Image (cartoon, grey):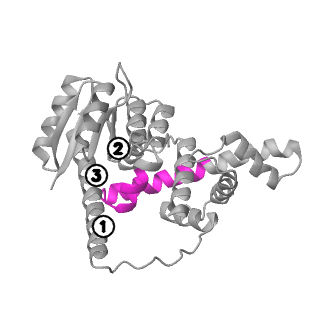
Amino acid sequence: MTLSIVIVDDDVVSRSMLQDIIDSCGFGELAGMAEGGLEGQRIVMDRKPDVVLIDLLMPDQDGIETVSKLKQSGYSGKFIMISQVENKEMVGAAYQKGIEFFIHKPINRVEVEHVLNKVNEQWKYERYVQEVKQSMARLNLVEAPAPAKTRTVREVARSILMDLGIIGESGSKDIVALMEYAIEQRQASELPPLKETYEAVARAYKPTAKDVEKECKAMEQRIRRTVLTALTNMASIGLTDYSNPKFEHYAPLYFDFQDVRMKMRAMEEEQAADKSKVNIKKFLQVFYMEIVEKMNG
């Protein structure tokens, strides 16, 4: 079986290009197309595709709102957002709503094929696991799972930091402390406001009010340097092996992919001046969500 895909985009040229790529790449088959969010919502719920390619900005109902309503209606497929918007807040909001990948406009065939290939691999793996579970259930071989060992926030956070190659960076200790505070507050899938989180951790470091403000600024600088190092590490892996599992998982999840590509280009051209950008809020939000997911799993 192949992926069934629905395209939701108000731009006829984009729809045509995506359809042509889907038809030619062999990763899936087109199950339907919609010109707007409301129509797309109806088609997705009617046809239940495996994947929805959805535009971020549409006149009747934007992509984020459409994704949110589809999830509330029980749709459990995968979402790939298509956008030329570079607004960090909107991109972050899309990730929080469950977008797994971004495809940038103007549409690039190589990028679309790479993303579809990645989604196709995930889908095949999930189907395989589900089929194994069903086979075991039919054979009455399913045993009660052993109680899972509870992992601490520190243990989970350190494993992620190791994967990112920043376990030894000075800001890593700050990131772990921020995550421990955030998990204690436990506001669903939302990281508590960064200012509040920084101040709470800084207060534990420096008890006087004057020192708290100074420590907050120092902490922000340490974390920014550490996240920039993580970006450099991911870009370096991507240059060596674009299909490396760590690169495929962490690069698009923790960073804006355009920032990763700019860093890779700068490293290729051996630019002396480092103009790399990172979205600290997104990085910490995703870090928090991964910890919650790993601890619950």
Q: Please state the extent of the stretch shown in magenta in the rendering.
A: 224-251
What residue is shown at x 12% (from left), y 49% (from top)? 26
User: Which is more toward the observer, 212 or 67?
Assistant: 67
Q: Residue beneath label 2, please? A: 75
User: Which is more toward the observer, 255 or 18?
Assistant: 18
Sequence-wise, which precedes: disc 3 or disc 2? 2
Numbered badge on residue 119: 3
Q: Position of residue 253 (x, y in %)?
A: 43, 49
Identify which amino acid the numbered label 2 is placed on: Tyr
Q: Position of residue 25 (x, y in %)?
A: 13, 47
User: Which is more toward the observer, 224 or 113?
Assistant: 113
Sequence-wise, which precedes: disc 1 or disc 3? 3
Q: CA distance from mark 1 to mark 2?
A: 20 Å
Identify which amino acid the numbered label 1 is placed on: Val
Mark 1 or 3: in front is 1
Q: CA distance from mark 3 to mark 2?
A: 17 Å
What residue is shown at x 30% (from left), y 76% (from top)? 136
Identify which amino acid the numbered label 3 is placed on: Val
Q: Residue beneath label 1, please? A: 129
